[in-house]
Image: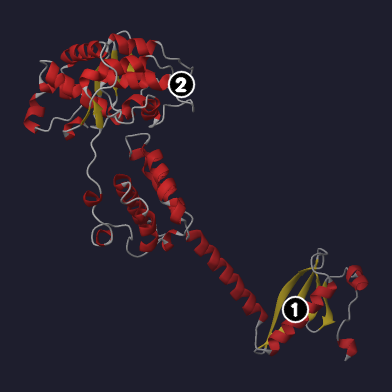
Amino acid sequence: MAHQINKLTVAKVNAITKPGQYADGLGLYLQVAAGGSKTWMFRYMRNGKARKMSLGSIHVVPLKDARQKAIELQRGLLEGIDPVAERAAKQAEVERQKREAAKVMTFKECAEAYIASHRAGWKNVKHAQQWANTLEAYAYPYFGDSPVQDVDTALVMKALSAIWTEKPETATRVRSRIENILSWATSAGYRTGENPARWTGHLKNLLPARTKVAKVKHHAALAYDAIGGFMSELRAMEGVSPRALEFAILTAARTNEVIGAQWSEIDLDNALWTIPGDRMKAGREHRVPLSDRAIEILRGLPREAGNDFVFIGASKKGLSNMALTMTLRRMNREDITVHGFRSTFSDWATERTAYPGEVREMALAHVVANKVEAAYRRGDLFEKRRRIMDDWAAFCAKPSGQGGNVVAIRDAAHG
């Protein structure tokens, strides 16, 4: 019996060159191919049929290890385990796990994919960054790295509860964004089941309505009779951000319109700033007449070759959304907001000038609510608006007391 096992030696394995199969015992064979390659084979009978499986090349599996593997396979046969079938089953399981892993995406990965797929449809170029920033701050710490399938009501509630009463407006946006991302993941096949971030019929039963956790806060605005002193202080400040804030006040423009301004939109010779529709809240092109001081600001700004941004930030791109607000903080004026200066302009135009209301509204780029009126109003009252903006610049240049009363924007039309 001793001669039926361990028939081969290392020296003999290395010396054999003739193609064929050479038995070592216990079903282990050395297989020599016509090209000279040598591999270990395990041969056995199963249900009356001869079967075989490779155990690897002799360069990878030495004789000693091949024998040990043959012994293990023989033991398996005694327990009714078919080596070939077992290997196939293991390989199939590995492939299945790979396929399942390929289907698994984290919430953060889904969020990034959602943002990328919707970026082209967002008219505000900074909208995608706003999405990323809020999710990074308020959602990712709780379940950003979790498989999107595992995001449930408990996780969503954990994220929202932390900010629902302190930052209701932000929390509302975060909830909506989470809901949209989870809906996208369901449509894309990365999760199944109900959306745990939906409001109606779900979170509405778990969280108080936004209107009940905080009073609506209006944008604080500087009283118009204090604008002169404020502008005098602002003009004394150095830097791009103070100039951008001053420009925003003089043009009664929104923050995003100013920080995204491009030199290609500016016509210095004709004192005109034409903002394309894709950067406007109403989605329509808006022409802004520029006062002498606004032109002076533009001519004094640094320009960089290949960079079309008017107000260049530290990243060599447009200023951040917070740049103008930070200027107010440097002035210790956290009692007012950048957006509030549009109300300051509106109140001044209403109470201190005889310009018709439609001139003021067009200067603010507001949409005409009355459809009949909008149909008959074909022009943009540009020349009248040039006069009102020149008068506003002159008013802003008049001396007045520092500081001033703060008033709340009373009308949603000031948006």
Q: Nearer the viewer, residue 89 or 173?
A: 173
- Identify residue for label 1: 42
Q: Circle 2 — which element?
A: loop
Q: Circle 1 — which element?
A: strand
Q: Say whether disc 2 or disc 1 marks the residue closer to the N-terminus.
A: 1
Q: Position of residue 226 (x, y in %)?
A: 24, 19
Q: Position of residue 61 (x, y in %)?
A: 80, 69
Q: How is the image coloured?
A: secondary structure
Q: Residue at x 34, y 65 (%)?
A: 193
- Decide if residue 379 is in sight here: no
Q: Quadrant of the C terminus?
A: top left
| Amino acid at circle 1 | Phe
Q: Nearer the viewer, mark 2 or mark 1?
A: 2
Q: Position of residue 10 (x, y in %)?
A: 90, 72
The image quadrant that residue 121 belongs to is top left
Q: Quadrant of the N terminus?
A: bottom right
Q: CA distance from mark 2 to mark 1?
A: 70 Å
Within 10 angstroms of label 2, few (less than 14), some, or many (20 or more) residues?
few
Within 10 angstroms of label 1, few (less than 14), some, or many (20 or more) residues?
many
| Amino acid at circle 2 | Asn
Q: Which mark is residue 367?
A: none
Q: Residue at x 36, y 56 (%)?
A: 182
- Decide if residue 307 is in sight here: yes
Disc 2 to disc 1: CB gap under 8 Å:
no
Q: Nearer the viewer, residue 391 or 180?
A: 391
- Identify residue for label 2: 307
The image quadrant that residue 17 belongs to is bottom right
